[in-house]
Image: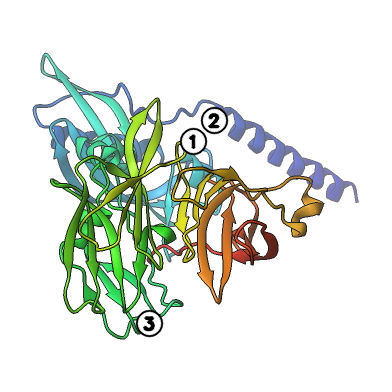
């Protein structure tokens, strides 16, 4: 019994001594130097290989803590990216399943246990025959700082959207071509020069999601407001896309929100003609023959979010949640009462604050109100909008909430 007890004590003592010794050894470990590492060499490729050998060798051996220790390493690829920048791709075989090593050494897992990959970009500085690592980074960090990436980042990007043919008569944009369809996408008809004149923004990007009230697609009349060297133009067809014509509306105007309406007595086009302190100011033009255009008095409201002229000749101008109506061709305007959605009473606030679209169907006037750029009332990952209706063109009542978020192309 005494021998067993003595043996047990001796075993625990040995374990304790080993643990203490290991801790003392591990405490002396220092991560291999990267930034500030120097070597005498005339080739950054050769210098990078020397650094790599020193780096992986420092991670081997019993004196290395398990959360840093490797058994072996293999240099898979080395590439000079540009002057003074070299990328090394290598494989590391770790000594244990200690998960901390993944974070400590910034490793990428593979399908094999204990095998990891790593990529490092070294930036070298050469002075007086000595090469020194000025900085190190992951490849993605290098790419972010390149001139090519910065140029791409600063270049306005065009967003592409998945087609939606819920409306049988609509438009479709793909591969920098604007099409219209009158049969839910079965047949696509190109709008000549439409992508450049209609979709191009002033910053060089393209607007591929056209606001609902900015165009009309029907068999009797299809029209888009465009911008060219002649000024603001109307690209239109009166024979279901078999032929296209262009009409100059005004020599003054620039791309912002644009609005187009067709009524029983003619056509109305509204667009920005002036800008001051970040606000766009609008003008409206009317034509009964699609060739001659005359100015219509426009309310003094900037940054219009919707303009719509109904079949009976009422003109609606909305900015945010304020909507004005004219019944006498713009001679006078009156503000309509803004309705609230009953469905959001429990929220404690009214999220619908931006009138985006007006349209007529079966002698009823409908209004879609969104949440603006900062809206966060969503369902199923899509922003919710409110649908209202009016039978007299002046008083609107809430109908329902709708999900009306365009899907980006995959």
Count of labels shown? 3
User: Along the line of sight, which residue is nearer the eye, 402 or 212?
Assistant: 212
Whichever of callouts 1 and 2 sits on the residue coming sooner in the sequence is: 2
Please tell me in which quadrant of the rendered image residue 367 appears.
Answer: bottom right
How far apart marks 3 and 2 lie (CA) works out to 74 Å
Query: For this view, does 195 lie left or right of residue 368?
Result: left
The secondary element bearing badge 3 is classed as loop
On residue 63, which mark appears? 1
Q: Name the residue tied to disc 3.
A: 184
Identify which residue is drawn at 44% across, 50% down.
329
At x 64% / y 37%, what residue is drawn?
A: 18
Q: Is residue 20 above or below residue 340?
A: above
Residue 275: percent from left, percent from top = 34, 31
Q: Secondary structure at mark 2?
A: helix
Q: How is the image coloured?
A: rainbow
The image position of residue 69, as x and y in percent, is 47, 43
């Amino acid at each position: 019994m005494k021998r067993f007890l003595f043996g047990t004590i001796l075993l625990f003592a040995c374990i304790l001594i080993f643990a203490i010794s290991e801790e003392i050894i591990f405490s002396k470990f220092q991560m291999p130097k990267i930034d500030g590492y120097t070597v005498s060499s005339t080739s950054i490729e050769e210098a990078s290989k020397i650094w790599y050998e020193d780096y992986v060798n420092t991670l081997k051996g019993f004196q290395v803590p398990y959360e840093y220790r490797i058994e072996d390493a293999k240099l898979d690829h080395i590439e000079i990216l540009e002057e003074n920048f070299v990328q090394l791709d290598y494989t590391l075989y770790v000594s244990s399943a200690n998960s901390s090593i993944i974070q400590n050494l910034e490793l990428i897992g593979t399908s094999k246990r204990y095998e990891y990959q790593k990529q490092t970009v070294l930036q070298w500085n050469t002075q007086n025959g000595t090469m020194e690592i000025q900085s190190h980074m992951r490849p993605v960090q290098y790419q972010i700082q390149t001139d090519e990436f910065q140029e791409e980042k600063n270049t306005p990007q065009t967003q592409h959207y998945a087609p939606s043919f819920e409306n049988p008569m609509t438009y479709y944009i793909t591969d920098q071509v604007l099409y219209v369809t009158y049969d839910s996408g079965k047949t696509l008809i190109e709008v000549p020069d439409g992508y450049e004149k209609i979709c191009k923004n002033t910053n060089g990007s393209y607007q591929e999601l056209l606001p609902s009230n900015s165009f009309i697609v029907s068999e009797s009349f299809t029209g888009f407001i465009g911008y060219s060297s002649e000024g603001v133009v109307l690209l239109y067809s009166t024979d279901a896309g078999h032929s296209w014509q262009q009409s100059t509306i005004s020599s003054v105007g620039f791309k912002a929100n644009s609005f187009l309406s067709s009524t029983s007595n003619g056509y109305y086009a509204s667009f920005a003609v002036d800008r001051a302190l970040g606000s766009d100011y609008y003008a409206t033009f009317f034509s009964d023959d699609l060739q001659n255009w005359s100015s219509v008095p426009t309310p003094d409201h900037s940054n219009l979010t919707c303009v719509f002229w109904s079949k009976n000749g009422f003109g609606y101008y909305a900015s945010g949640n304020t909507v004005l109506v004219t019944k006498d061709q713009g001679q006078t305007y009156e503000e309509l009462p803004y309705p609230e959605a009953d469905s959001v009473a429990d929220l404690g606030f009214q999220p619908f604050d931006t009138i985006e679209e007006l349209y007529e169907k079966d002698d009823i006037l409908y209004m879609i109100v969104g949440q603006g750029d900062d809206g966060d009332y969503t369902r199923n990952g899509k922003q919710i909008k409110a649908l209202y209706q009016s039978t007299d063109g002046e008083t609107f009542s809430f109908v329902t909430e709708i999900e009306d978020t365009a899907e980006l192309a995959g």
